[in-house]
Amino acid sequence: MHVTDSFTYPAGLETVRTMATNPQFVRSRLNFPGVEPAKITVEERDADTVVHMTVTISETALPDAARRFVKKGVSADVTETWSPISDGTCHVTMDLSVQGAPVTARALSTLNDQGASTQRSVDADFHVKVPLIGKSIEQRAATRVSLLWKNEVRAAEKWLADHPQD
């Protein structure tokens, strides 16, 4: 399932990139019912910044169609690779895999500096390889993705208000 969307952060690109690669911000943006961030690491790899998250997702936070297959929730690994800023633009690749479930996702984002704000455009692909109902689970998961991005913007707004010097 392919999903595209865009949203705006209320800060310039340099501030957004610094915020988004801060482990404390990453933890705050994962603040969802049923989601528990177990491990967050940030490392510099060549010119990129790599943010790796391992999260536990309770069965109550999963789409109904997926709950039939999961009794105690799942663990997911998310890796975001942030390129350096060049000419007012930054690129992010996000890869997600779920342990014990045939679920993967890849999202490619372009962030453009707009001065006092940053526009983020996202192209994402979700794959659930379950016979007969995989497409249904993908569709339900895709509808939740916009909620994730809205939560991301709310977390950014709060973070920026609480950390005006960052």
Image (cartoon, grey):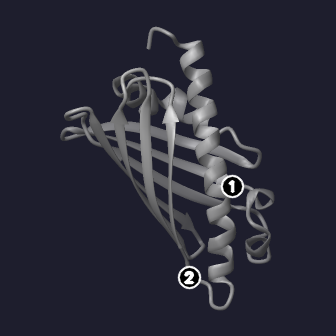
Residue 108 placement: quadrant: bottom left
- Relative vertical location of residue 18 with respect to residue 79 in this rendering, above or below: above
Amino acid carrying label 2: it is: Lys
Residue 75 numbered tag: none
Percent coordinates x, y for residue 157 in the rendering: 59, 25
- Relative vertical location of residue 32 with respect to residue 69 in this rendering, above or below: above
Amino acid carrying label 1: it is: Ile
Q: Residue at x 56, y 66 (%)?
A: 99
- What residue did someone put label 1 on? 57
Q: Residue at x 81, y 58 (%)?
A: 60
Say if residue 28 shows up in the picture: no
- What residue did someone put label 2 on? 129
Residue 145 placement: quadrant: bottom right
Q: Distance between the Cα atoms at labels 2 and 1?
A: 19 Å
Question: Of 112 and 34, which appears nearest the observer?
Answer: 112
Percent coordinates x, y for residue 68 in the rendering: 79, 77
Look at the numbered disc 1 and give the secondary structure of its residue. Answer: strand
In the rendered image, the quadrant that contains the C terminus is: top left
Question: Of 116 and 166, which appears nearest the observer?
Answer: 116
Q: Is residue 146 left or right of residue 73?
A: left
- Relative vertical location of residue 74 with respect to residue 102 in this rendering, above or below: above
Q: Residue at x 45, y 8 (%)?
A: 165
- Relative vertical location of residue 61 with respect to residue 152 in this rendering, above or below: below
Q: Residue at x 39, y 22 (%)?
A: 15
Residue 158 placement: quadrant: top right
